Image (tube, rainbow, N blue to C red):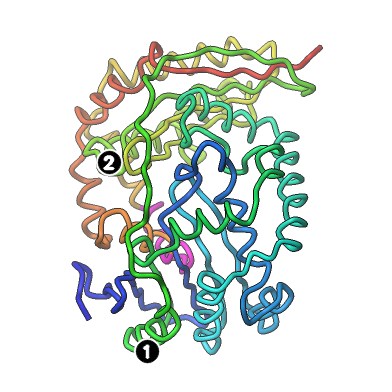
């Protein structure tokens, strides 16, 4: 058993990485992260990773779809999955006495799914309904179209769901081809948070995941096209204006990402006292929702600002946003002010760690990206080391209006 940097992390004998987070609670959480997602699709595979995620619940070599869905639900647990740009997760939450049941079920789903033609055909209609649901949500659609504008003709900019046309065209051979490329040992991390001891978990994982193929994921991720900003306005059957602006941002291995995380958090993060919310919603009362978002990937990232407001208030709101971005570029924070933002971010990070499921996901992703788990003390130290000059430097580099792509949805009438 080879240890990684973190004392509760290890490799299984077949190369799968495992991270164990002890938590003395009545429930446990575990998940298998597979390091492939929608960005790993070939052009004719648009939406295939998400389609496979749905197919994982349609039956295995030993269970039909009803038995798959009932295995944990029958004992009050939960099993689910999701697809992202760079990963797919199969995860579960359960009473501790059902931990082995959850592990065995996740292994069965991940390793033994049969992707039955009849069941998969039915699931196409479900996914098309999901796609149409996104089309009914202007906010969801705006973010998807913004990604495509920032990363044009590139898989990382495409919708994870695919299109109705692409989903209808999938064959079982397409499913099998993608599955064999990505669902391999060197591309997997199993993460657990709960009270079951490390040795018992390791034994169960060795037993149930022994059949994972021992090979490297076969991906050939294409280079990014040159970024040219775009500005687009679209009329839709909606009641208010929806506006988004976006640009490329630091990646997960970029040293600037730490300062950028703090910058995004203070500008438009989840707290109600973020700069955009205080200035646009609270002070001027011209938007119900305004926020910023930062999504880093392994080799790039995207930053965006979203605003929903009445059409006649749009120009004023955009002027206020530009004013705040200009201040961030031109006027550095005092050390005292920045320390307040640091304290807020550290508190948010600590609260996130208090959630067993969040901790499970974060540990798995960290092990996959960095091959180690950073302690809370290490994370706090990184935050403490950020200077006002660091914030101003990333603001000047990334918050330049000349670099932003924008997309505006306007009511037809």
Checking the image for residue 216, the label placed there is none
Task: Tell me the quarter of the image containing the C terminus.
Answer: top right
Q: Could you tell me which residue is drawn at 50 percent across and 59 percent down?
A: 179
Q: Residue 350 magenta-drawn?
A: yes
Q: Could you tell me which residue is drawn at 56 percent across and 43 percent down?
A: 45
Left or right: 392 in relation to 284: left
Q: Within the image, what quadrant is residue 397 found in?
A: top left
Left or right: 83 in relation to 286: left
Count of labels shown? 2
Element at label 2: helix
Residue at the spot of label 2: 258
State the residue in front, 360 or 384: 360
Task: Tell me the quarter of the image containing the N terminus.
Answer: bottom left
155 is higher (above) or lower (below) than 81: above
- The percent coordinates of residue 117 (x first, y second) are 71, 61
Q: Residue 133 magenta-drawn?
A: no
Q: Callout 2: 10 Å neighbours few (<14), some, many (20+)? A: some
Element at label 1: helix
Q: Main secondary structure of the magenta part?
A: helix
- The percent coordinates of residue 84 (x first, y second) are 50, 49
Farthest residue to the front: give it. 173
Specify start and end residues of the magenta stretch as a single range.
347-360
Checking the image for residue 200, the label placed there is 1
Among the two numbered marks 2 and 1 on one chain, the one whose residue lies closer to the N terminus: 1
Q: Could you tell me which residue is drawn at 23 percent across and 24 percent down?
A: 393
Gap between marks 2 and 1 measured at Cα: 36 Å
Left or right: 280 in relation to 310: left
């Amino acid at each position: 058993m080879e240890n990684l940097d973190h004392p509760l992390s290890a490799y299984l004998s077949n190369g799968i990485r495992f991270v164990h987070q002890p938590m003395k609670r009545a429930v446990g959480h575990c998940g298998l992260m597979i390091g492939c997602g929608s960005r790993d699709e070939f052009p004719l595979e648009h939406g295939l990773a998400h389609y496979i995620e749905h197919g994982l619940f349609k039956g295995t070599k030993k269970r039909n779809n009803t038995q798959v869905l009932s295995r944990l639900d029958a004992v009050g647990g939960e099993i689910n999955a999701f697809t992202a740009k760079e990963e797919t997760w199969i995860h579960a939450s359960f009473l501790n006495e059902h931990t082995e049941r959850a592990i065995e079920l996740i292994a069965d789903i991940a390793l033994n799914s049969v992707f039955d033609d009849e069941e998969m055909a039915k699931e196409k209609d479900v996914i098309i309904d999901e796609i149409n649901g996104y089309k009914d949500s202007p906010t969801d659609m705006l973010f998807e179209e913004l990604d495509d504008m920032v990363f044009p003709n590139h898989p990382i900019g495409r919708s994870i769901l695919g299109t109705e046309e692409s989903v209808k065209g999938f064959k079982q051979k397409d499913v099998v081809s993608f599955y064999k490329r990505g669902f391999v040992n060197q591309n997997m991390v199993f993460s657990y948070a709960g009270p079951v001891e490390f040795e018992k978990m390791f034994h169960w994982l060795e037993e149930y995941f022994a059949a994972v193929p021992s090979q490297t994921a076969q991906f050939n991720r294409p280079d990014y096209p040159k970024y040219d900003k775009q500005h687009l306005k679209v009329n839709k059957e909606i009641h208010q204006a929806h506006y988004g602006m976006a640009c490329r941002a630091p990646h997960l291995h970029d040293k600037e990402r730490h300062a950028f995380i703090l910058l995004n958090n203070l500008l438009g993060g989840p707290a109600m006292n973020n700069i955009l919310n205080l200035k646009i919603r609270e002070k001027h009362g011209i938007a119900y929702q305004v926020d910023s978002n930062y999504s880093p990937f392994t080799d790039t990232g995207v930053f965006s600002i979203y605003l929903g407001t009445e059409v006649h208030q749009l120009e004023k709101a955009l002027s206020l946003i530009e004013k705040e971005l200009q201040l961030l570029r031109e006027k550095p924070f005092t050390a005292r002010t920045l320390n307040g933002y640091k304290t807020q971010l550290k508190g948010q990070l600590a609260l996130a760690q208090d959630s067993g499921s969040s901790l499970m996901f974060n540990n798995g992703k960290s092990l996959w990206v960095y091959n180690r788990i950073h302690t809370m003390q290490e994370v706090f130290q990184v935050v403490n080391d950020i200077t006002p000059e660091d914030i101003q430097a990333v603001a000047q580099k990334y918050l330049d209006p000349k670099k932003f792509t924008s997309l505006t949805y306007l009511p037809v009438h």
